[in-house]
Amino acid sequence: MEYHAIIVNKSLMDESFIDRLNVIGKKEGSWVLYKISVGESDLAKTIKEIQAIMRDSSWYFHFYNADGSKLIVVFKTKQFETDNNPGNWNDIIEYGKELNIPVEQLDFVPNTFSDEKF
C-alpha cells in the first residue's frame, strides 16, 4: 500500500532531507510544499526520521492512503492513527490546540489521493 504526505520545508531543521524522499509533487510559494510517496514497508521508519528533524512541536504532517481509510497525523513527539472522517479527529485537534496550532490548520487535507491539488 502506498501513502502520501505533504511536508512543509520550514518544518524541517535540515531541508536537504527532502532529497532522500520520493517527491512526487512540489508547490512553491512563501513556503515550499513537497508531496511525498512512501510504501507501507518504509512508513514507520520514514515517520521516525522526519520526526527527528522536525523544528518543534508546532508543526505536524500527515500520511494518508488512496481512499482515506488510513490517516496518520504526526507531531514531533506523538502520532495518531485514524481515517478521513472528521468526526474521528477530536483527540488530534485537541492535541494540536494544546501545541498552539490554530484549529483552522488542523484540517488534514488532503486525506485521499483524489483530494490532492498538486
Image (cartoon, rainbow, N blue to C red):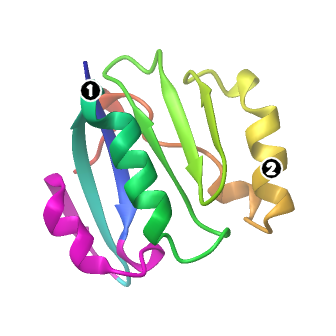
For mark 2, does the 10 Å Cα neighbourhood hold few (<14), some (14 to 19), or many (20 or more) residues? Answer: some
Q: What segment carries the magenta color?
A: 9-29
Please determine whether, in this image, residue 71 is positioned above or below residue 54.
above
Q: Amino acid at mark 1?
A: Ser
Please determine whether, in this image, residue 112 is positioned above or below residue 63.
above
For residue 101, side relative to residue 44 (left or right):
right
Read off the residue under disc 1. Answer: 41
Q: Residue at x 74, y 64 (%)?
A: 102
Q: Residue at x 44, y 71 (%)?
A: 53
Q: Residue at x 47, y 15 (%)?
A: 69
Label 2: which secondary element: helix
Q: Amino acid at mark 2?
A: Tyr
Residue 118, given in percent of the width and then of the height, sits at: 22, 51
Residue 38, given in percent of the width and then of the height, sits at: 24, 38
For residue 90, side relative to residue 60 (left or right):
right
- The earlier-in-sequence mark between 1 and 2 is 1
Q: Quadrant of residue 81?
A: top right
Q: CA distance from mark 1 to mark 2?
A: 27 Å
Which mark is on residue 95?
A: 2
Q: Nearer the viewer, residue 36 or 45?
A: 45
